[in-house]
Image (cartoon, rainbow, N blue to C red):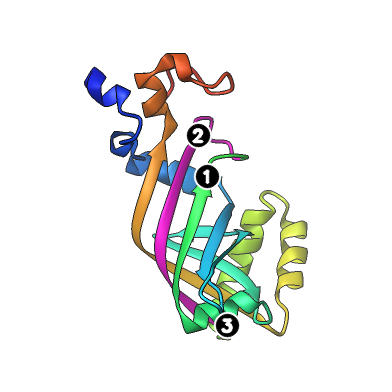
């Protein structure tokens, strides 16, 4: 990277998240911000749990949540995932534009809810089963989010270009 690129903080394309680091983030994090278009067209967002399996994001909610009706009307959603609060040391983030599919079929619910519960309660099979049971309500839906495009950011690349600006809580020289 040239010093001119390092000084142009407006253009962060060179600080994109590499595939391996993206997967590390998605395997370490269980929360994302889900963004959809509300009934009046305004963007709406909420922080929710997710699991990432084979290139697909899986979320769950009650059919009674207003966002489900909105997503059925317009399945274009976005999700934003950050490393904050995860085991990933460097600050990383990624946003995906996705097409959402709302599943109500028993086969999908029975397949996803145990994986979801286990991911939310790792190493605690009894608590995971109790959580799965709690989630398995009569109005339960599973959202399948299929990524269309992504924008990723890796702060380690940026701090490498400007060590003096590195936050105190960011690992020095790691990537």
Taking the magenta stretch, the answer to whether it contains residue 9 is no
* Dot 1 or dot 3, earlier in sequence: 3
Instruction: Identify the image quadrant of residue 146.
Output: bottom left
Query: Mark 3–mark 2 contact, CB under 8 Å?
Result: no
Q: In whole angstroms, how far apart are the C-alphas of marks 3 and 2?
A: 34 Å
Q: Which residue is mark 1?
A: 82
State the extent of the magenta-drawn residues as a range: 86-104
Q: Position of residue 57 (x, y in %)?
A: 48, 62
Is 107 left, or right, of 154 in this rendering? right
* Dot 2 or dot 1, earlier in sequence: 1
Direction top: furthest residue: 164
Per the rendering, the mark at residue 91 is: 2
Residue at point 75%, 72% (across, down): 133
Q: Does any portion of residue 156 appear in the rendered image? A: yes
How many numbered circles does the render carry? 3
Residue at disc 1, secondary structure: strand
Query: Mark 1–mark 3 contact, CB under 8 Å?
Result: no
- Pointer 3 local density, CA inside 10 Å: few below 14, some 14–19, many at least 20: some
Per the rendering, the mark at residue 69 is: 3
- Pointer 2 local density, CA inside 10 Å: few below 14, some 14–19, many at least 20: some
Where's the C terminus, which quadrant? top left
Q: Position of residue 91 (x, y in %)?
A: 50, 34
Say above or below: 48 vs 166.
below
Foreground tag (3 vs 2): 3
Instruction: Identify the image quadrant of residue 54.
Output: bottom left
Residue at disc 2, secondary structure: loop
Q: Position of residue 104 (x, y in %)?
A: 57, 84
Residue at disc 3, secondary structure: helix
Residue at point 63%, 40% (across, down): 85
Is 94 left, or right, of 58 in this rendering? left
Q: Position of residue 90 (x, y in %)?
A: 49, 30
Query: Mark 2–mark 1 contact, CB under 8 Å?
Result: yes
């Amino acid at each position: 990277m040239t010093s001119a690129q390092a000084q142009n903080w407006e253009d962060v394309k060179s600080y994109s998240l590499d595939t391996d680091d993206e997967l590390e983030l998605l395997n370490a994090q269980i929360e994302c911000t889900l963004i959809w278009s509300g009934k009046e067209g305004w963007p709406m967002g909420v922080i929710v749990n997710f699991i990432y399996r084979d290139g697909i994001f899986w979320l769950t909610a009650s059919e009674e949540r207003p966002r489900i009706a909105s997503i059925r009307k317009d399945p274009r959603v976005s999700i934003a995932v950050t490393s904050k609060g995860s085991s990933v040391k460097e600050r990383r983030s990624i946003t995906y534009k996705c097409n959402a599919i709302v599943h109500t079929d028993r086969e999908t619910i029975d397949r996803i809810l145990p994986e979801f519960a286990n991911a939310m309660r790792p190493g605690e099979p009894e608590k995971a089963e109790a959580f799965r049971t709690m989630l398995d309500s009569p109005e339960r839906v599973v959202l399948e989010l299929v990524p269309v495009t992504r924008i990723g950011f890796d702060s380690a690349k940026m701090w490498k270009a400007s060590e003096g600006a590195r936050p105190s809580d960011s690992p020095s020289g790691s990537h």
